[in-house]
Amino acid sequence: MTPIFFALQIISGIITVFFVLVKEPKAEGLGAIGSSAQSFKGVRTSADDKLDKMTWFFAGIFLISSFYLGLIAR
């Protein structure tokens, strides 16, 4: 059972990183300090919502599998 959770952890971690990198940035980073940041897209689309939900879903799977593997390692 442990190899299944180990594989699940690796796969969900890779997918989570992918979804985080695919998402549009919400701020301009250091350019936002001087109030010079301009928002080109102020409206969230359904694709943004789906990416957020998928990111949280796979991050949750990663956390649960990490917790399980941490308990077994004792």
Image (cartoon, rainbow, N blue to C red):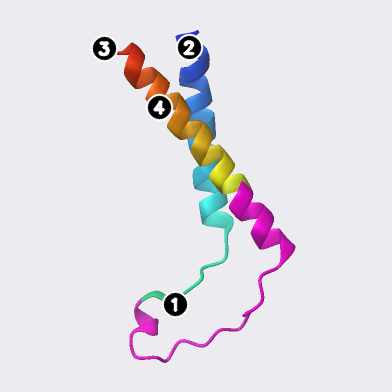
The local crowd at label 2, few if under 14, some if 14 to 19, many if 20 or more residues have their Cα within 10 Å, is few
Tell which circle, 1 or 3, labels the residue nearer the N-terminal end.
1
| Residue 3 badge | 2
What's under tag 2, amino acid-wise? Pro
Q: Disc 2 vs disc 4: Cβ atoms closer than 8 Å? A: no
| Residue 74 badge | 3
Tell which circle, 2 or 4, labels the residue nearer the N-terminal end.
2
Q: Residue at x 63, y 53 (%)?
A: 51
What whole-number distance in Å separates the C-alpha atoms at marks 4 and 1?
32 Å
- Residue 72, percent from left and from top: 35, 12
The image quadrant of residue 73 is top left
Tell which circle, 1 or 2, labels the residue nearer the N-terminal end.
2
What's under tag 4, amino acid-wise? Ser
The local crowd at label 4, few if under 14, some if 14 to 19, many if 20 or more residues have their Cα within 10 Å, is some
Read off the residue under disc 1: 28
Q: Secondary structure under badge 2?
A: helix
Given residues 15 and 70, the one toward you in this image is 70
The local crowd at label 3, few if under 14, some if 14 to 19, many if 20 or more residues have their Cα within 10 Å, is few
Q: Residue at x 68, y 53 (%)?
A: 50
What whole-number distance in Å separates the C-alpha atoms at marks 1 and 2?
41 Å
**Which of label 2 and label 3 is nearer to you?**
3
| Residue 66 badge | 4
Q: Secondary structure under badge 1?
A: loop
Tell which circle, 2 or 3, labels the residue nearer the N-terminal end.
2
What whole-number distance in Å separates the C-alpha atoms at marks 2 and 4?
12 Å
Magenta-highlighted residues: 30-53
